[in-house]
Image (cartoon, coloured by chain):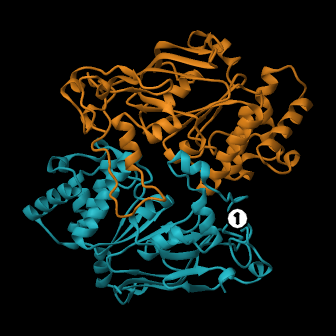
């Protein structure tokens, strides 16, 4: 396998608030290889966005703090870089796309200026060359009449077009890694389909690795090579797309898959919701964080935090049911 | 066949947007809602599905056309009958954070309708509130708390309890689950289904998530740019969509199954939804339609029953 592009080890991120310390991310470990797409799925508050923002070091400090862990990109630990050194990474080695294309563009600047801002900072090139690069990328992301469009303002673009702009902007400096935080959540389904196709095409053409954060399992099934399932600040299961969809081993992953209706599903079948709601991350439970909502919880789950168990080369799960002494319920 | 509870006839709702221009949010749509069924209304943002719901319940006055509820024209009801109408038709809103008054205790939020209509007073009122809380899966201790103490899913349950408080017959649910997490969505949908069975409710379920709408609805209407494109039984619509827009919509919805996704042939629509202020002539979908013909630009297709109980507005079927 060689050296991974990105290696996150035991990452822990906390926020101090008036009510105490919120442990948003509690020991996350995963790697991203060159050219692959890794999805992080989970519900709101599970720490998926905080994980992504930590890679870019976009966590506001204070109140946030990377408490523990390393984030190695091409062998360099991003967690220990100074703010100034980090600026050389952001936008250059790692591009980021945010959820809301409406608020992540500056409404008072021409699109062309926003697209070329990063490349002019990072690379010694002329404005004309930067503009040419911007035109190339607008062509790549499927925006017609790029030269004309560069002189327009964000309000002259529709939601889907703005997300295309964001993607073009993130790709300007030819990053090796693209982090997309809920890139299609704010879009309509027919536009979502266009954007997902665009991601695939871009990866084919540029070989960029993608981390996609989403709560939509359908999107994941279309785009990801591997999946990390997060719950209460931890990765509870990780595996290839097929392992997670066809052989989920963590009760939470199973719960997620069972609770969404499928377009090709049977109407008479009841959805199986996960009862209750996620734990309070001010004081995470002592044992497994999912135990309180888990149908298969045993005594040990309430008192001891489970270890990660290796099932295949890619498939790991953090659950006591994998222990030899446990009875397999499924 | 079940009795018609609501009849929507050639309903139009236009908004003035200045300079003499009009935004045709709902443009001449007709459909019926039968007693005890769930009718799903789907479409992308700006297609007019929420405006349709809001016009039916008279949060908006109709520009033209009518909504008939149990024989009365909703927009012509006057005097005492208005109150009675308001009791029988209720609404559940999308955003559980914005639709509950943060300064009111849950008890008063739920009972507000009962107070207005003068049903259940004093001890009965408290008892009824506690019953409702239990019905929606909360408990009576929650009655004295305030909305900020609840999660999104719990708030949506409070919104449902409020709608149920006045014993309505018809509930319009406008994107009731789209602000919730997936595992919580299933809880709320199951609750709505159970309540429908126990109380004999009729739902108009408005949402953009077609997989969820298909799961909950008996029949589904598909809207695009203010117009109703197709209306059919859920299974028929999924198995045999007629309108090219419905086909494209179905094909753009991802299925949480990687194998199926690989094998699936998808039609991806190009372009964006045009502005409803200046919609295309003829059929509103023709600018993105893979099957558009000359006639589509000239004439608006007629709303017709192309197959038994399967309605469509498309020149391909005329």
Q: Where does the image place residue B83, in percent across and percent down from the top left?
A: 29, 78
- From this view, report whether residue A316 is shown above or below residue B169: above
Q: Pick the residue in front: A183 or B98.
A: A183
User: In front here: B20 or A267?
Assistant: A267
Q: Determine whether the residue tagged by mark 1 lies in a helix, strand or loop.
A: loop
Residue drawn at (60%, 20%), measured in percent from left and top? A6
Q: Residue at x 48, y 77 (%)?
A: B61
Percent x, y of residue B160: 30, 60
Residue at the spot of label 1: B274
- Rendered shade, chain B: cyan
Residue A84, image quadrant: top right
Name the one closer to the observer, B61 or A142. Answer: A142
- A85 in relation to A48, above or below: above
Q: Residue A171's quadrant in the figure?
A: top right
Residue B289 placed where, x, y %?
71, 68
Image quadrant where residue A274 sits? top left
Residue drawn at the location 46% of the way across and 29% of the way down: A238
Q: Quadrant of the N terminus of chain B?
A: bottom left
Q: Chain of mark 1?
A: B
């Amino acid at each position: 396998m060689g050296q991974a592009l990105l290696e996150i080890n035991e990452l822990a991120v906390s926020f101090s608030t008036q009510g105490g310390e919120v442990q948003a991310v509690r020991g996350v470990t995963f790697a991203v290889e060159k050219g692959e797409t890794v999805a992080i799925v989970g519900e709101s508050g599970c720490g998926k966005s905080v994980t992504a923002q930590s890679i870019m070091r976009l966590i506001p400090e204070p109140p946030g703090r990377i408490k523990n862990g390393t984030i190695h990109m091409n062998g360099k630990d991003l967690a220990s870089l100074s703010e100034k050194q980090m600026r050389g990474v952001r936008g250059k080695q790692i591009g980021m796309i945010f959820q809301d294309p409406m608020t992540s563009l500056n409404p008072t600047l021409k699109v062309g200026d926003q697209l070329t801002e990063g490349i002019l900072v990072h690379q010694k090139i002329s404005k004309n060359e930067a503009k040419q690069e911007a035109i190339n990328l607008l062509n790549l992301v499927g925006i017609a009449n790029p030269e004309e469009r560069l002189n327009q303002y964000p309000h002259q673009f529709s939601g889907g077009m703005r997300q295309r702009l964001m993607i073009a902007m993130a790709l300007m400096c030819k990053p090796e890694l693209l982090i997309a935080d809920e890139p299609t959540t704010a879009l309509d389904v027919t536009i979502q389909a266009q954007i997902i196709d665009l991601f695939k095409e871009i990866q084919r053409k540029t070989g960029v690795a993608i981390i996609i954060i989403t709560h939509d399992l359908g999107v994941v099934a279309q785009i990801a090579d591997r999946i990390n399932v997060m719950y209460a600040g931890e990765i509870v299961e990780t595996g290839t797309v097929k392992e997670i969809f066809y052989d989920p081993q963590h009760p939470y992953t199973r719960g997620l898959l069972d609770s969404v209706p499928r377009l090709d599903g049977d109407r008479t079948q009841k959805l199986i919701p996960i009862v209750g709601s996620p734990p309070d991350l001010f004081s995470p439970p002592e044992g497994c964080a999912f135990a309180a909502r888990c149908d298969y919880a045993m005594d040990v789950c309430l008192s001891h935090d489970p270890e990660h168990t290796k099932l295949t080369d890619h498939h790991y799960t953090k659950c006591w049911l994998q222990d030899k002494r446990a009875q397999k319920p499924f | 066949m079940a009795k018609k509870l609501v009849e929507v006839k050639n309903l139009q709702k236009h908004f003035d947007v200045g300079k003499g221009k009009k935004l045709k949010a709902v443009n001449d749509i007709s459909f019926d809602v039968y007693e005890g069924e769930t009718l799903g209304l789907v479409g992308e943002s700006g297609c007019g599905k929420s405006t349709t719901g809001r016009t039916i319940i008279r949060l908006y006055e109709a520009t033209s056309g009518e909504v008939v509820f149990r024989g009365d024209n909703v927009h012509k009801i006057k005097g005492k009958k208005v109150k009675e109408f308001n009791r029988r038709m209720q609404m559940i809103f999308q955003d559980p954070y914005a639709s509950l008054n943060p300064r009111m205790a849950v008890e008063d939020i739920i009972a507000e309708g009962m107070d207005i209509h003068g049903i259940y007073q004093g001890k009965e009122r408290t008892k009824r509130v506690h019953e409702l809380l239990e019905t929606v899966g909360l408990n009576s201790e929650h009655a004295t708390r305030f909305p900020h103490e609840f999660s999104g899913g719990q708030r949506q349950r409070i919104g449902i309890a409020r709608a149920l408080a006045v014993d309505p017959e018809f509930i319009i649910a406008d994107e009731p689950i789209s602000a919730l997490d997936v595992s919580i969505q299933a809880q709320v949908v199951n609750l709505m289904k159970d309540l429908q069975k126990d109380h004999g409710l009729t739902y108009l379920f408005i949402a953009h998530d077609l997989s969820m709408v298909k799961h909950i609805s008996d029949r589904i209407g598909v809207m695009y740019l203010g117009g109703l494109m197709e209306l059919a039984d859920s299974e028929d619509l999924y198995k045999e969509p007629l309108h090219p827009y419905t086909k494209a919509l179905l094909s753009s919805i991802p299925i949480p199954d990687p194998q199926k996704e690989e094998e699936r042939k998808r039609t991806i629509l190009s372009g964006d939804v045009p502005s409803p202020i200046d919609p295309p002539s003829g059929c509103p979908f023709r600018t993105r339609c893979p099957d558009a013909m000359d006639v589509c630009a000239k004439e608006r297709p007629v709303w017709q029953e192309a197959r038994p109980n399967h309605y469509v507005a498309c020149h391909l079927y005329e």
